[in-house]
Image (cartoon, rainbow, N blue to C red):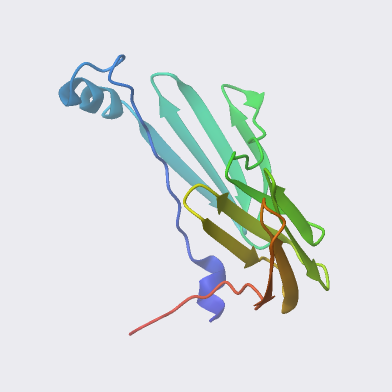
Amino acid sequence: MKEWIYARNGLYIETGDSRRFRSFAAFRKHIMKITLDEQQDGDLRDVTVTTPDGVMRAVYDRRAEVFPRREFNGARYDPAPFTSSRAAIGGEGAVSVGKVAAACVPPQPLFLAADPTRKVYVLMNLGETATEGTLTLANGNTKAVTLPPYRDMVVFNP
């Protein structure tokens, strides 16, 4: 499994609005001008994407799993944290979306997605150990749930 440490993958997505690109051919002409350059130095991966609209650069440390540098057109770029009117992430064992809330003991980071109109709720333990959770609905009703620990899995089928 030592080879997995040096696995390389990534994703760059370019999107276009139909008001800017009147046809797929016009959008395709735009994306044909995009270049991507990658340099590696040990655990550091330096990727530069040059588009007609600007230059995006990211340096990623594969061992530490952090971005020591991200920029767009030479200016520092800090992505906005996750936000949604129907979902939230709570880091201290509690999270809420509107009038729907969840908590757990022992405290673990939680993800909650709630659509009360459709009566659909998703609660996920993002922590490393199992925890007992309580989901409180907008009407005050509660539901006790056991939340297993989150695990990032890699499945390999030769």
Side (left or right) of 97 relative to 34: right
Side (left or right) of 149 relative to 10: right
Residue 136 drawn at (x, y percent): 71, 59
Residue 74: name its quadrant: top right
Side (left or right) of 50 relative to 76: left
Q: Nearer the viewer, residue 39 or 2?
A: 2
Callout count: 0
Seen in the picture, residue 146 relative to 11 is either above or below; the reply is below
Residue lying at 82% horizontally and 67% vertically, measured from the top left: 107
Residue 83 drawn at (x, y percent): 62, 39
Residue lying at 72% horizontally and 56% vertically, measured from the top left: 140
Residue lying at 22% horizontally and 28% vertically, measured from the top left: 28
Side (left or right) of 79 relative to 21: right
Seen in the picture, residue 36 relative to 90 is either above or below; the reply is above
Residue 49 drawn at (x, y percent): 45, 34
The quarter of the picture where the C terminus appears is bottom left
Residue 105: name its quadrant: bottom right
Residue farthest to the bottom, as pictured: 158
Residue 150 drawn at (x, y percent): 63, 72
Q: Nearer the viewer, residue 12 or 139?
A: 139
Seen in the picture, residue 128 relative to 53 is either above or below; the reply is below
